[in-house]
Amino acid sequence: MLSATEKVIRNYIEGIRPPIEIRDKLDIGFSFVNNTLIVFEIVPFFMDNSKKIERPVIKAHQIAKDLEAILDEGQYEMGFV
């Protein structure tokens, strides 16, 4: 079962994913483990297009108890990996 934080993150990521037509060439995913969010690009491996690699782009740690409210209000900063 997803936590409220994970639901907010999932909805946000779904909103910024590229169009379905190009997701085999570029997509966006995330992981949220131990209050750490990692957003990554999913792209084909240049030597073998049948393999995908994940390149981290953003890493953020949850330090506020109410991260959902912060994300909803747009009052957040994220660092780039």
Image (tube, helix red, strand yellow):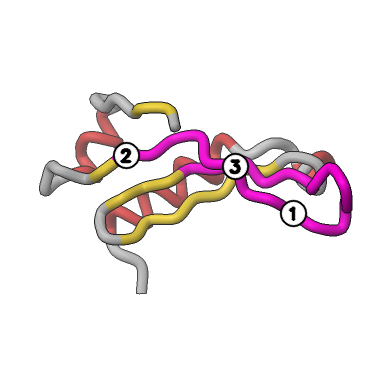
Viewer-nearest residue: 60 or 65: 60
* Residue at numbered disc 1: 52
Does the stretch in magenta take in 48?
yes
Amino acid carrying mark 3 in the image: Arg
| Residue 70 image offset from top left, x and y in percent | 22, 35
* Residue at numbered disc 2: 60
Q: Earlier in the sequence, mark 2 or mark 3?
A: 3
Residue at 20%, 39% in the rendered image: 69
Does the stretch in magenta take in 77?
no
Viewer-nearest residue: 18 or 72: 18
Residue 4 relative to residue 32: left or right: left
Number of residues whose C-alpha sits closer than 10 Å to that of mark 3, classed few (under 14), some (14–19) or many (20 or more): some
Residue at 68%, 43% in the rendered image: 27
Residue at 13%, 42% in the rendered image: 64
Viewer-nearest residue: 48 or 22: 48
| Residue 11 image offset from top left, x and y in percent | 46, 47
**Quadrant (top left/top right/bottom left/bottom right) for the N terminus:** bottom left
Q: Are marks 2 and 3 in contact (CB under 8 Å)?
A: no
Q: Are marks 2 and 1 in contact (CB under 8 Å)?
A: no
Residue 52 relative to residue 69: left or right: right
Residue at 79%, 48% in the rendered image: 45
Amino acid carrying mark 2 in the image: Ala
| Residue 59 image offset from top left, x and y in percent | 38, 39
* Label 2 SS: strand
Amino acid carrying mark 1 in the image: Lys
* Residue at numbered disc 3: 55
Magenta region: 39-60
